[in-house]
């Protein structure tokens, strides 16, 4: 039978399990009505759990949280199975009812009074679930380093043009030197021929 006063989430009290460490589980109570609803929390093992709060009032269409803290366990139960259970009782109360006004008699079953009960069991869950292993990143073929190397190995167009201009200038200077040498040599040859003619 589903509850008409409170919606309780989750339907199982899940508490992380760690040896010699204290852990908690959280329950959320949501008022499904337009009335004030009082609640009370009970457990089959009160020495093992600390409940805050154990009683309270949920406003119309409002919500309230419950924190259940388990004492540090000393041993691992078989198959991580827990036999502990919780019981949440709820009842409609008058508007303006506060925490101080809540008493045990409110939740006693009497003719003409509706007291809803919700039972839930304790479930142990891993305290530190393993995280998925990230896939290895594929090696990038075009890395920034390779781009830098490529730029260093391949000169720019302006560099090539300047080197070409430098080579052409050297070739021009060489040609001018050869022409000058030929002119001087031709002059000496002519003078030598004139000198020989005078001696004859």
Image (cartoon, rainbow, N blue to C red):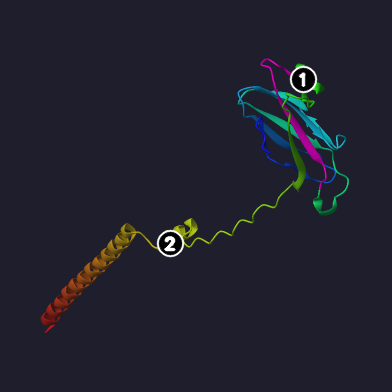
Residue at horizontal 81 percent and vertical 23 percent from the top: 104
Total count of labels: 2
Q: Nearer the viewer, mark 2 or mark 1?
A: 1
Q: At which x and y percent is residue 38? A: 72, 24
**Secondary structure of residue under mark 2:** helix
As rendered, which of 165 and 184 lies closer to the eye?
165
Residue at 72% x, 42% y: name it: 12
The image shows residue 111 at horizontal and vertical percentages of 76, 25
| Residue at 14%, 77% in the rendered image | 190
Disc 2: CA contacts within 10 A as few (<14), some (14-19) or many (>=20): few
Q: Point out the stretch of residues depicted in magenta.
A: 82-99
Q: Would you name the residue on which mark 1 appears?
A: 102
Q: Is residue 178 above or below residue 29?
A: below
Indicate the position of residue 42 as horizontal and vertical percent values. 80, 32
> Mark 2 = which residue?
150
- Residue 63 placement: quadrant: top right
Q: Is residue 83 magenta?
A: yes
């Amino acid at each position: 039978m589903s509850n008409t006063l409170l919606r309780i989430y989750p339907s199982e009290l899940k508490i992380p399990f760690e040896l010699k460490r204290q852990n908690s589980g959280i329950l959320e109570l949501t008022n499904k009505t337009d009335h004030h609803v009082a609640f009370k929390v009970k457990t089959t093992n009160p020495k093992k759990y600390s409940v805050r709060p154990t009683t309270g009032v949920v406003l119309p269409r409002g919500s309230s949280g419950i924190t259940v803290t388990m004492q540090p366990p000393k041993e691992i139960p078989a198959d991580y199975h827990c036999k502990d259970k919780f019981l949440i009782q709820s009842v409609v109360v008058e508007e303006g009812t506060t925490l101080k006004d809540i008493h045990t008699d409110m939740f006693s079953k009497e003719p003409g009074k509706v007291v809803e009960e919700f039972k839930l069991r304790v479930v142990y869950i891993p305290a530190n679930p393993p995280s998925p292993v990230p896939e290895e990143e594929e090696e990038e073929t075009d890395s920034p380093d390779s781009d830098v190397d490529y730029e260093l190995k391949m000169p720019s167009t302006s560099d090539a043009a300047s080197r070409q201009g430098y080579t052409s200038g050297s070739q021009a200077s060489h040609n001018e030197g050869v022409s000058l040498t030929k002119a001087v040599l031709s002059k000496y040859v002519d003078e030598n021929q004139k000198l020989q003619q005078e001696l004859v």
